[in-house]
Image (cartoon, coloured by chain):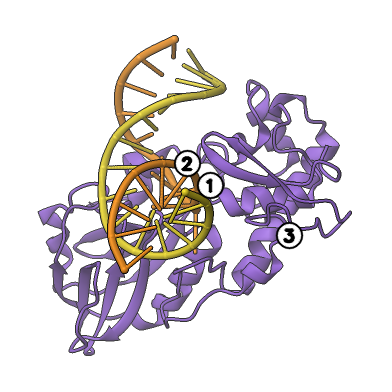
Chain colours: A purple, B yellow, C orange
Amino acid sequence: MPELPEVETTRRGIQPFVEGKRIEALEVREPRLRWPVEERCRDVIDHSIEAVKRRGKYIIMHTAGGNLIWHLGMSGSMRILPTVHASADHEHVCLQLDDGNSLRFRDPRRFGALLYCEHDPLQHPLLARLGPEPLSPGFNPDYLQAALATRSGPIKNQIMNSQLVVGVGNIYACESLYRSRINPRTRANRISLERLQRLTQAIKQTLQQAIEQGGTTLRDFTSADGKPGYFRHALQVYAREGLPCPGCGRPVKRLVLGQRSTFYCSQCQR
DNA sequence: AAAGACACCTGTCCGC
DNA sequence: TGCGGACAGGTGTCTT
């Protein structure tokens, strides 16, 4: 489920409820996430959450007792509920706050993660080698051209590679390539600077618009208040195999790249 | 160094 | 109604 817009929506949703609050308890009902939840996560107990940040698809909570790094994986979501509220199925972690509310982490598939990092979380091995934020000025045509110089694989695989740029998952890769009229199979290092200009712009616009819509809900994504995202209605090719392309009316095609479904228009995207 | 396959999980949907 | 198989928003790890 969660690509950058969904993670950012989640971050914005929880931030006002957790920032400045003290962590009274950390209840791990199911430690078997992507990696086992470590015992030292408990070092944050009795400390206040000073800030809630995002890097790529990671959500980072800063406290004087160390930092919590969250990843939503494929099926993760967060909600704020009264602590007395019973926990739901697949709600693996509960962070109890000092105002009677708690943050619940639910993740049926358990591809998500809760990590602890005592010092600078950006230096954590999983975060240290991440590429630039797609909405930052550092992600631009010149950067992308240099980054792709040695990459001959399909462009779609490249923009989904978090070492080149973070936050772009399967939905937004498909949508951004459609918007920039680039065929997802195009070999990355053969794309002109002009077309990379279109691509970087399309990625920025698509992600920005999706954030403004609260992300995309395909099946079960909800933000911290339990509401779905509305960008689903703006999807032009993703999960629309056989339906007419909004540009030319021909049926949207599907192929598999990097073992992921890829949706595109063979007429509009060259 | 880059690319591709595989792994990790549960839930849902579709065809028979 | 039940069952098997395909598929799902991610990404680290291993092998070529």
- The answer to which image quadrant residue A88 occupies is bottom left
- Asked if residue A126 is positioned above or below residue C13 in the image, the reply reads below
Q: Residue at x 13, y 63 (%)?
A: A42
Instruction: Please name the residue that numbered disc 3 is placed on.
Output: A236
**Can residue A75 be seen at all in this image of the molecule?**
yes
- Label 3, secondary structure: give it: loop
Q: Name the front one of labels 3 and 2.
A: 3
Question: Which of marks 2 and 1 precedes in the sequence?
Answer: 2
Instruction: Please name the residue that numbered disc 2 is placed on.
Output: A130
Q: How far is disc 3 from disc 2 in space, using C-alphas?
A: 28 Å
Residue A166 - label? 1
- Label 2, secondary structure: give it: loop
Front one among A151 and A137: A151
Residue type for callout 1: Val
Percent across and percent down for residue A206 are: 69, 59
Label 3: how many Cα within 10 Å (few below 14, some 14–19, many 20+): many
Q: Quadrant of the C terminus of chain A?
A: top right
**Can residue A18 be seen at all in this image of the molecule?**
no
Question: Subunit of mark 1?
Answer: A
Q: Are marks 1 and 2 on the same chain?
A: yes
Residue type for callout 2: Leu
Residue type for callout 3: Gln
Q: How far is disc 1 from disc 2 in space, using C-alphas?
A: 7 Å
